[in-house]
Image (cartoon, helix red, strand yellow):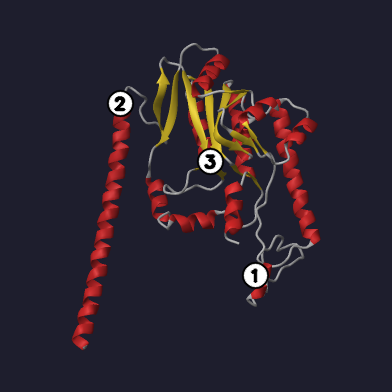
Amino acid sequence: MDNQQSQKSGRGIGFWASASVAVFFFLSTFLLLIMILGSLTSLKSVITGGPAADGDYTEELVEGSGEKKIALITVEGVITSSSTTLFSDKSTTAEEFKKQLEYIKKDSQVKAVLLQIESPGGGITPSDIIYNELLRYKEESGNKVVVLMGDVAASGGYYIAVAADKIIAHPTTITGSIGVIMPLVNVSELISKYGIEDKSITSGDMKDLGSPMRPMRPEEKAVLEGIIQEMYERFVSVIATGRNMPVDEVKKLADGRIYTAQQAVDNGLVDRLGYLSDAIEQSKELAEIDEAKVIRYKRRWGLGDLLNVARGISPPGVRQLLEWPVMDSPRLMYLWLPGFTQGIMAHR
């Protein structure tokens, strides 16, 4: 019996040793592959006559020709402040967006920016940062910005869009959802059922504001509603300025509902319906140019990305759950959350 246990123990040690070696060689091969891909990206730039890699980006031709350029940028997924890992769901960070604009500003051949938005919105601060960066880019460069909306350009996605000189929506776009949300889940009844008690010690009555561990008091709700109302007023003001609409008219539209593309046009939230070709022509018209090549930017992989890969190896389902707003500290968001709400209801 001892010999059998010893053999099993030996086989276990051998298995883990083999597994460790396999993982090491996998990661080494992966690192080598990334280095090769990075080299090929630079080589492709030289072969195709494009600009050599400069900084963090390389240019990719979408269509057109000539020396003048229209820069195509995408705001995709949830708008966040923090960096995302390479394998996480698509999202846009304010920091990454700012870097792209700074890169574009250095190129005197760029005569307009075409911003594609495919986003339900996100954090109020990163949405506002991107909005402000667009305004600053327009002021410093003198160039025009055109927005083309995709499937969804709602809440914070629309907030960003109003910085543009023209907004074009795809005929099937969903937009609107103008307003603020603070996702909160209260589990006080559930924990009470299992005899769990919240023993948090605070320095003041409002220190644990929005705690999911106990029922919300009326005075707490009043504080949160006051903050939400202030952020809502800012959202309305941004739209009124960007769309040249009276504040009262905007408020009639800003009750959180979503709009189809045609409804958005009818209500003055969008200028017209169209496709990518229409948005490109609109960009040329505003830039007063007849010919231009449309380019998009691809970020080069670096050591930081590799570290993010290592950090992001956790199972996607777990990571997505932990990244949802209600599982983090409570925060105000310009975000359309239909899928999340349905998910909560389905698990009740």
Quadrant location of residue 257?
top right
Residue highlighted by disc 2: 46
Residue 109, horizontal then vertical, whole percent: 47, 19
Q: Is mark 2 on a helix, strand or loop?
A: helix
Residue 6, horizontal then vertical, whole percent: 21, 82
The residue sitting at the top extreme is 290
Q: How far apart are marks 1 and 3 (CA)?
A: 39 Å
The residue sitting at the bottom extreme is 1
In the image, what residue type sits under mark 3? Glu
Q: In which quadrant of the rendered image does the C terminus lie? A: bottom right
In the image, what residue type sits under mark 1? Leu
Neighbours of disc 2 within 10 Å: few (<14), some (14-19), many (20+): few
Q: What element carries label 1?
A: helix
Quadrant location of residue 186?
bottom right
Q: Is mark 3 on a helix, strand or loop?
A: helix
Q: Distance between the residues labelled 2 and 1?
A: 62 Å
- Measured along the vertical axis of the image, is residue 313 above or below residue 162? below
Residue highlighted by disc 1: 190
Residue highlighted by disc 3: 95
Q: In which quadrant of the rendered image does the N terminus lie? A: bottom left
